[in-house]
Image (cartoon, grey):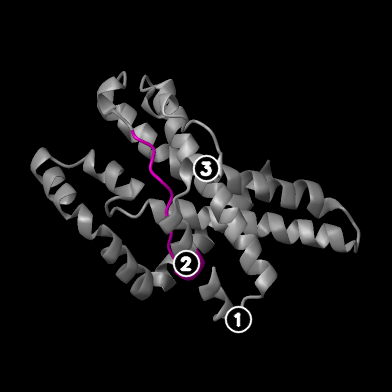
Amino acid sequence: MIYLLFQGVSLPICIMTFAILLFSLCVHEFAHAYVAYKLGDPTAKNLGRMNISPQSHLTLYGTIAMLFLPIGWANPVPINSRNLKNPTRGFAWVSAAGPLSNLLISFVALLLFYQVFGRINSANPLLSSTLLFLYYFATVNVGLAIFNLIPIPPLDGSRLLMLAFPNTARRIMLTYERYGFFIIIVLIYFCSPIFYQLMEWVMSGLIWLVNIV
C-alpha cells in the first residue's frame, strides 16, 4: 500500500489496510472453494485450498503488487464446473460467493461498529482504535466486492456476465482474458471517481441495514 503514502495516508493506516486486504482476499477465495465443495466440486478442497491460510491463497507477485499499486490478487481457487450438481447455476453461485463473502464481512464489521462498540460511551483510545479498525475493515471489503464484480476477465463479474452470454460471445471474452489486467488498470486510473461513488452507495446501504437490525 505504498502508493497510499504518496496520497497522504499515514503509515499505520497503510499497514492496517494492507493487513485487512490480505485477510479479506483469503476469505474471498475460501468462499469460492467452500461453495464449490457444497455444490459438488471438491477440487479446491482436495488441493488444500478450503481454508483462510495466507499460504494457501496469496501469491508473491500479487502481494507485491498490492504493496505498490492500487491493485493486487490472490491465487484463484480451481473450479471444475463439470462436478457441480447444476453446472450453470452452480458456477454462478461459486462466482458470486467471493464478493458476497466480502459484503458479509463488511456487514458484520459495521454491525459491531454501530450496534456494539459504537454504543459504548467512552473516550478510551483503545475503543477509538477499534472503531477505526472496524470502519476500515468494512470499507476495504466493500471495495473488494465491487472491484471483483467488474465484468472484465478474470474477475468474478466476468464469470457472472458470461453465464448470460451465448457461447460465441463467451469465447470472445475468454480470448481477451489475457488483456484483462491492463484493461482493469486503465479503468482504475480513469474511472476511480465512479468506483468510489459506488463504494459510498454500498456503504450507505449497509449502514442503513445495520441500523434497522
Query: Of circles 1 and 2, which is in front?
Result: 1
Q: Amino acid at mark 3?
A: Gln
Classify mark 2: helix, strand or loop.
helix
Mark 2, residues whose alpha carbon is within 10 Å: few (<14), some, or many (≥20)?
A: few
- Residue hosting label 1: 8
Q: Amino acid at mark 2?
A: Gln
Q: Position of residue 156 (x, y in %)?
A: 35, 46
Query: Of circles 1 and 3, which is in front?
Result: 3
What is the C-alpha distance between the residues marked 1 and 3? Answer: 31 Å
Pick whichever of labels 1 and 3 is earlier in the sequence: 1
Classify mark 1: helix, strand or loop.
loop
Q: Position of residue 94 (x, y in %)?
A: 38, 33
Q: Position of residue 199 (x, y in %)?
A: 50, 61
Q: Nearer the viewer, residue 100 or 20?
A: 20
Q: Which residues are magenta?
A: 67-78
Q: Nearer the viewer, residue 117 or 73?
A: 73
Quadrant in the rendering for residue 192: bottom left
Q: Position of residue 210 (x, y in %)?
A: 66, 46
Q: In the rendered image of this protein, does residue 111 appear above or below residue 19?
A: above
Quadrant in the rendering for residue 146: bottom left
- Residue hosting label 3: 55
Disc 1 vs disc 2: Cβ atoms closer than 8 Å?
no
Q: In the rendered image of this protein, does residue 164 appear above or below residue 189?
A: above
Rendered-image quadrant of the N terminus: bottom right
Q: Residue at x 45, y 67 (%)?
A: 70
Q: Residue at x 21, y 40 (%)?
A: 164
Left or right placement of residue 52 versus residue 64 in this view: right
User: On residue 197, which mark appears?
Assistant: 2
Pick whichever of labels 1 and 2 is earlier in the sequence: 1
Q: Amino acid at mark 1?
A: Gly
What is the C-alpha distance between the residues marked 3 and 2? Answer: 34 Å
